[in-house]
Image (cartoon, helix red, strand yellow):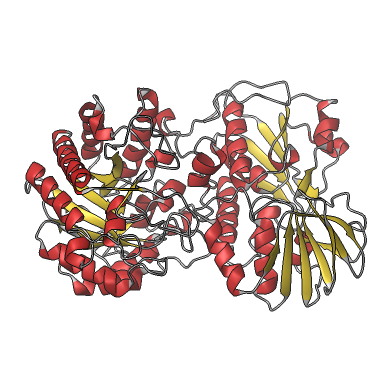
Amino acid sequence: MSRGSAFPHLFSPVQLGPMELRNRVMMPPHNSAIGNLWGADEGEADRTIAYLESRAKAGVAWIGGVTGRIQNQFIPGFEPSGISAETKGYFRLPYFVDRVQKVTDTLHAAGAVVTCQMTMIGGFPHAPSARPSSPVSNQLPHVVTAREISWFVQEYGFSAGQALRAGLDGIELHVNHDDLLEWFLSPLTNHRQDAYGGSLENRARFVVETLTAIRDAVGTSMAVGIRLNIKEEVPGGYDAAGGIEIAQYLESTGLIDFIHGVVGTPWGNPSYIQPHFFDAGQWAELAGDLKQAVSLPVVHTGLVNSPEIAERILASGHADVVGMARAHIADGELLVKAAEGRTEEIRPCVGGNECINRRYVDGLPFGCAVNPHTSHELEGPWARSDSPRRLLVIGGGPAGLELAGLAAESGHSVDLWEAQDQLGGQLRIAAAAPRHERFGQYLQWQQNRLADLGVKIRLNHDATADNVLAEDADVVAVATGASARRPPIPGAQDPHVLEIRDVLTGRAAVGERVIIVAQDDHMPPLALADHLSSRGHQVRIIYATNGAAQLLGRYIVGGILGRLSTQKVQFRFMEEVTAITAGTVTTRNVYSGVEEQLDGFDSVVLACGGVAESSLFETLRERRGNVHLLGDAFAPRRLVFATRQAYALAKILQGPPVADGLAIEKDNR
């Protein structure tokens, strides 16, 4: 079988204006979450470039890795706020050309073409009219004047000239996802009475003037295209037919070489970074409708998470090129493995959006939940240990599985003990929730990985201090996870009060009407509500916080909240559960102290997180050295925390033995 023969469309070349692609895969801009290309610290820029280079070397044809904020303008002292609220345009940086030339030289050498995406996301504070773009943001903008529009047009032209000087192959104009240009196109946000409002020709005037300025600067030497919402998700915006009309009008100007059709918003259902609640390639047919209506090449990005999905979209004629971002975060060798017929080895993306949430919600360094190597490309290939040892891992949950795999890849001999009859721990439980199948796929990938590496696994094997000591391993890593937490609420310990793990695994049966006590700031209470409501149960969920899942972030929360709304789940916020009986649940408002008694339910289920199980570690560290603790056994957190901790410990184990059980991670990027 020839290289890539299973994916003939995916691995065929294509031309977009003057830009020739060796295959049909592009990586949309997403590396701002990995590292700041524009900071004065060139080390962070080098880390970003190394990430992009690794994906280009692995076969990505088109890297859209240069996100270019346009210079902003506002009165002295005004302070823009929010994500993407930039003041200084990247194209105005004194080192823009040199920095981007480094990107283009590196990626061209790897065989990829490189484009920049010009953005003015959210306006900050500008808009065509004094209208908010969504129901979740109520800050009214400054209405730009015709003079200010002209200033922006000139700024786009200047920026295009800089892009040309930097050696970029193309420019993608960001006309979507709450960009100022989208707001001009949209009947929801554009209510102007001048030459920039009203008819489609008028609403598109700003975009056309901008494209004209770009073409004046670059001529035909660069590919120029637009990234366009195929439809808007908010009532009052344009629908799919309106999106096609916009695309046809912009094509008719002769100013563009391609159209990049996408869906979603920065906050809603779906978000433009679609999580795992949606089907892979779910919106490809909309892109296909767009492609049928225009003659230009169409690019489509929208949860294209595998080579099989990409091939299906291309073979069906829904797009000429597919955008794949998170799939390449999860596995930088995706295209190599696809071309060599090794698709079963591709590390699957679970779609949990930790890659963006950590940076923009938690304020933490970048991290991929399933691939802790991502963003460490500058360090080179994963190293073999200079002093291979025998490692015993206690616990086959996410942390233990990842550590076992990394340690085996370092050359250590690894044994893994698991008390249950299956591997996975809470990862296996999570995979039982609706639309969490990708977590199960990742678990299966981990099990295949450990089998291929020769990790010796013992199931149904309880670890005690004595049998661990008798094993006499060189190193012991305790990843015993966390036990179910039952909060100190009167009645919460009673047998009739159930717990999320037992419900998701089917060990406990629930009645028709269910109250969920939510003391968890992430996905589990909502996944439980989905599990029950999708099976016909009437569900009420009680939060002490003033909203659901405070740590989920706007790029994922809309998907699950939308599902639960259609399944008629009822929410109660700002209420702490203070007592549970067989017939009533008592709540107290956390701010006013007002109490209320709830009835009319058949079951109460606790979704209250876990309590670290570290007792084995504490006993072992008193009796031997080289014992380590990781994962929920230290402090219950999420999948991405477990895999990053495994990576940090595995890096330590590549070096000489560490006697103390609580090693400090020096580089916590």
Left or right: residue 638 versus residue 64 is: right
Left or right: residue 204 versus residue 253 is: right
**Would residue 26 be seen by someone viewing this image from the given angle?**
yes
Residue at horizontal 51 percent and vertical 52 percent from the top? 554
The quarter holding residue 227 reads bottom left
Q: Position of residue 241 (x, y in %)?
A: 28, 75
Q: Position of residue 626 (x, y in %)?
A: 73, 26
Q: Position of residue 429 (x, y in %)?
A: 69, 59
136 vs 626, nearest the viewer: 136
124 vs 602, nearest the viewer: 124
The quarter holding residue 435 reads bottom right
404 vs 288, nearest the viewer: 288
Above or below, 63 against 339 in this view is above
Above or below, 125 against 505 in this view is above
Above or below, 87 against 665 in this view is below
Left or right: residue 154 versus residue 70 is: left
Residue at horizontal 66 percent and vertical 59 percent from the top? 430
Residue at horizontal 55 percent and vertical 24 percent from the top? 386
Above or below, 206 against 632 in this view is below
**Would residue 1 be seen by someone viewing this image from the given angle?**
no
Marker count (numbered): 0
Left or right: residue 241 versus residue 296 is: right
Q: Position of residue 264 (x, y in %)?
A: 41, 61
Where the N terminus falls, by quadrant?
bottom left
Residue at horizontal 46 percent and vertical 63 percent from the top? 270
95 vs 152, nearest the viewer: 152
